[in-house]
Amino acid sequence: MEIIVRDNADQMSRSAATVVARVLNSKPNAVLGLATGSTPLGLYKELIRMHKDEGLDFSQVTTFNLDEYVGLTKKHPQSYHYFMHENLFKHINIPTQNIYIPSGTTDNYEAFCEWYEDQIERCGGIDLQILGIGSDGHIAFNEPTSSLGSRTRIKTLAKQTIDDNARFFDSAEEVPIYAITMGVGTILEARKLLLLANGRAKAAAVAAAVEGPVTSMITASALQLHHEAMAIVDREAASSLRMLEYYEWIQAKMPDAP
Ligand code: F6R
């Protein structure tokens, strides 16, 4: 995995936006996999700025979101539909019909999950998947012990995730218990993976994901199996990495690399 360490969350977001822009510039009809939560907010702000100031074009882009809470309607302020609309989609020129987000209110979850996987395939697969990481090491809502071959399905959220996400709700009791989420196997099929993490609260999870064994206890560790996975983290999230000096040495030597 390529590890890029930035001084702070702003720099992390700007570097991530550069990676996204590079993909869009080389493939204007790219398929992006998107995450929600607090981590990618700065990235989305920077993409909006690039769209407005530099003409970054989303008119041919298709997006697939990782997950959605079960039971929240699209209009619920804590739904990921609402989050994506408010924090990205309404500010850029992406056609509505190119936006895919798992449904939290379908009558038939099994059929929906199968349909979602089919749509990813029909669109040619995901070119770049953006990922955050939970403090329990999850990617999307693949909680500890999720199969590393899992596909889109319903997962029961771990207590720690419910507690972590309670900050967005009035109380922990209001956080939905179930989510519909892309599987680890689905995520690993994307052509490139970009994991973002900032803040000290993520340091242990980042270290376990990057340097620990590949294990379903830390589903982000599955990124080690991918041939084009990159993690951009800020200094605090990098603070428990044993090989930090090596990653920084690689970065410093990058311009001269053959
Ligand atoms: C959200 C998602 C989750 C978050 C993770 C970190 O779509 O897939 O895995 O990325 O829970 O959340 P934040 O960024 O809020 O710390």
Image (spheres, rainbow, N blue to C red):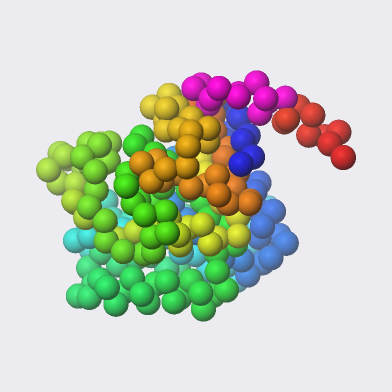
- Residue 74, above or below 248: below
- The answer to whether residue 9 of the structure is visible from this angle is no
The residue lying toward the viewer, choosing from 203 and 148, is 148
Residue 9, given in percent of the width and then of the height, sits at 52, 31
Residue 90, given in percent of the width and then of the height, sits at 45, 60
- Residue 24, above or below 172: below
| Residue 246 falls inside the magenta stretch | yes
- Residue 6, above or below 29: above
From the viewer's perspective, tell me whether residue 180 is left or right of residue 25: left
- The answer to whether residue 115 of the structure is visible from this angle is yes
Specify the quadrant that holds the C terminus: top right
Specify the quadrant that holds the N terminus: top right
Residue at 49 percent of width and 22 percent of height:
240
The residue lying toward the viewer, choosing from 180 and 174, is 180
The residue lying toward the viewer, choosing from 155 and 215, is 215
Q: What stretch is highlighted in magenta?
A: 238-249
From the viewer's perspective, tell me whether residue 8 is left or right of residue 23: left
Total numbered labels placed on residues in the image: 0
| Residue 248 falls inside the magenta stretch | yes
Q: Which quarter of the picture shows residue 232?
A: top right
The residue lying toward the viewer, choosing from 87 and 36, is 36
Residue 248, given in percent of the width and then of the height, sits at 68, 25
Residue 231, given in percent of the width and then of the height, sits at 57, 40
Residue at 48 percent of width and 33 percent of height:
212
Q: Which quarter of the picture shows residue 173?
A: top left
